[in-house]
Image (spheres, rainbow, N blue to C red):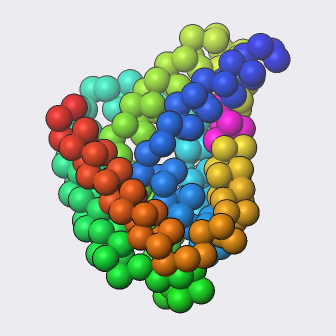
């Protein structure tokens, strides 16, 4: 029983930890100390719903309708490019952490949800892959595996969001934010191109 849970935890972490648009946004919000709890909660809840849905058998449904993933692929790429443009514009007009205009909680939650659910890879990783691996554990252990994967998500997003708050002092200057926004913009362009090509 413990083996299935630990395997789920490590597999979930291996898939979640890779730097992507969602992780970059969580890191940014953590550094800004802005609505971190809401961002972390949306990411954890999104992963939990998708992992548990995959374990319940929704992965087979997703695999049967590749057209849905295709729509998500193009919508996700468009959103990432829009996010990249915003990041580049912010890099051209950098401001210190204290000068940055706060965003509303609803806006931050909407952005987090878009970065979570407009990425077709999240469905392949959580619903299809983790769901399939969970169901290979057998009827008695599949939910233990899924619970381990969900725990990995909870640990990762909590550590990323709240751990990033410690970087706020180091990243106070406008120059640091110029580099952060430029880096996030480049990452978003790279991820959008990857989405389109794959």
Residue 167 position in % (x across, y down):
67, 63
Residue 11 position in % (x across, y down):
60, 24
Q: Count the labels in the image.
A: 0
The N terminus is located in which quarter?
top right
Which SS type dominates the magenta stretch? helix
Residue 67 quadrant:
top left
Residue 150: within the magenta?
Answer: yes
| Depth order, front residue of 123/141 | 123
In the rendered structure, the answer to whether residue 41 lies left or right of residue 83 reads right
| Depth order, front residue of 151/101 | 101
Residue 191 position in % (x across, y down):
30, 45
Above-or-below relation of 84 to 118: below
Q: Which residues are magenta?
A: 149-153
In the rendered structure, the answer to whether residue 179 lies left or right of residue 37 reads left
Residue at the image position 39 percent from the left and 31 percent from the top: 124
State whether residue 43 appears in this view. yes
Residue at the image position 69 percent from the left and 71 percent from the top: 169
Residue at the image position 48 percent from the left and 42 percent from the top: 19
The C terminus is located in which quarter?
top left
Residue at the image position 34 percent from the left and 68 percent from the top: 87
Residue 44: within the magenta?
Answer: no
In the rendered structure, the answer to whether residue 10 lies left or right of residue 85 reads right
In the rendered structure, the answer to whether residue 75 lies left or right of residue 46 reads left
Above-or-below relation of 144 to 77: above
Residue 58 position in % (x across, y down):
44, 32
Above-or-below relation of 180 to 9: below
Residue 173 quadrant:
bottom right
């Amino acid at each position: 029983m413990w083996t299935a849970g630990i395997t789920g935890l490590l597999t979930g972490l291996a898939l979640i930890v890779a730097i992507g648009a969602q992780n970059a946004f969580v890191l940014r919000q953590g550094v800004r100390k802005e609505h971190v709890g809401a961002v972390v909660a949306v990411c954890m809840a999104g992963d939990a719903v998708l992992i548990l849905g995959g374990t319940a058998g929704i992965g087979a449904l997703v695999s049967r309708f590749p057209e849905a993933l295709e729509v998500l692929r193009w919508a996700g790429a468009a959103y990432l490019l829009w996010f990249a443009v915003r990041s580049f514009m912010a890099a051209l007009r950098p401001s210190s952490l204290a000068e940055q205009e706060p965003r509303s909680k609803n806006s931050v939650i909407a952005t987090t949800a878009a970065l979570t659910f407009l990425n077709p890879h999240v469905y392949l990783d959580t619903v299809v892959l983790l769901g399939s691996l969970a169901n290979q554990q057998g009827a008695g252990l599949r939910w233990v595996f899924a619970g381990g994967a969900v725990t990995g998500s909870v640990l990762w997003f909590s550590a990323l969001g709240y751990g990033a708050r410690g970087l706020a002092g180091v990243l106070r200057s406008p120059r640091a934010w110029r580099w952060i926004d430029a880096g996030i913009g480049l990452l978003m362009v790279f991820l959008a191109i990857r989405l389109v090509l794959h």
